[in-house]
Image: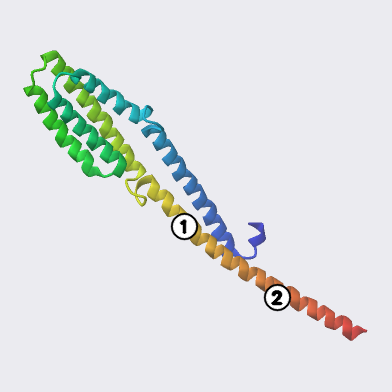
């Protein structure tokens, strides 16, 4: 920045650029930390919680009632649709379908103990899925939302600042070259006159 000490506009832009790069780094760190919270693989973090909860329900239903298992698979489909599309409507569908599923559990021929376990595990599944939805929302359902949106905004700011700095630097260099050329020509003419 000392190079631009004579040009306060460039110094200001460089300070702003430094701040925006820090903001970008913070936004990137937020995305990384949120992804770690969500999960880096299917068995990790929130993904792992979802997987465990749903497998517990599937185990309880295994071989008992194919209609209930089909309903359970519909919940999994809503979950997967959400994960693929990051659209809140799939969370809403999941909530509707889970209410219907719990009603079907109550009406089923399962023992009271199994019904209680299934409903308890569905609630755990719903809680884990709800946390995942909220974490994804914070991260950003779309590139211009959440942490992703913050990072994208800083990228645009960096581009704008770099353009201004480059234009200003180019102008400063051209002015400097012009003044050096002028001094060089003057020195040359003075030397020629003195000879």
Horizontal relation, residue 47 to residue 29: left or right = left
Give the image location of residue 185, x and y in percent.
79, 80
Residue 136 lies in what quarter of the image? top left
Where disc 2 sits, the SS reads helix
Spatial distance from mark 2 to mark 1, Cα to Cα?
31 Å
Give the image location of residue 175, x and y in percent.
66, 73
Farthest left residue? 107
32 shown above or below 125: below
As rendered, which of 70 and 104 lies closer to the eye?
70
Q: Which residue is mark 2?
A: 178
Looking at the rendered image, the quarter that the C terminus falls into is bottom right
Q: Earlier in the sequence, mark 2 or mark 1?
A: 1
Residue 181 lies in what quarter of the image? bottom right
Question: How many other residues sit within 10 Å of disc 1, few (<14), some (14-19) or many (≥20)?
Answer: some
Q: Which residue is mark 1?
A: 157
As rendered, which of 12 and 46 lies closer to the eye?
46
Where disc 1 sits, the SS reads helix
174 shown above or below 75: below
Give the image location of residue 160, x and y in percent.
49, 61
Point 34% across, 42% down: residue: 138
Point 30% across, 23% down: residue: 52
Point 77% across, 76% down: residue: 183
Point 57% across, 57% down: residue: 14
As rendered, which of 92 and 12 lies closer to the eye?
92
């Amino acid at each position: 920045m000392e190079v631009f000490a004579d040009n306060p506009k460039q110094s200001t832009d460089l300070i702003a650029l430094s701040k925006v790069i820090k903001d970008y780094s913070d936004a990137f760190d937020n995305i990384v930390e949120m992804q770690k919270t969500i999960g880096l693989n299917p068995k990790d973090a929130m993904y792992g919680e979802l997987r465990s909860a749903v497998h517990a329900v599937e185990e309880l239903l295994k071989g008992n009632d194919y209609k209930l298992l089909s309903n359970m698979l519909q919940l999994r489909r809503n979950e997967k649709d959400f994960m693929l599309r990051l659209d809140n409507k799939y969370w809403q569908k999941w909530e509707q379908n889970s209410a219907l599923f719990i009603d079907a559990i109550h009406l089923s021929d399962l023992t009271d103990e199994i019904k209680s376990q299934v409903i308890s595990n569905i609630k755990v599944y719903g809680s884990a899925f709800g946390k995942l939805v909220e974490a994804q929302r914070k991260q950003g359902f779309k590139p211009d939302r959440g942490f992703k949106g913050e990072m994208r905004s800083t990228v645009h700011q960096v581009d704008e600042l770099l353009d201004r700095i480059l234009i200003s630097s180019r102008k400063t260099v051209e002015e400097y070259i012009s003044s050096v050329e002028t001094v060089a020509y003057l020195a040359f003419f003075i030397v020629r006159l003195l000879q």
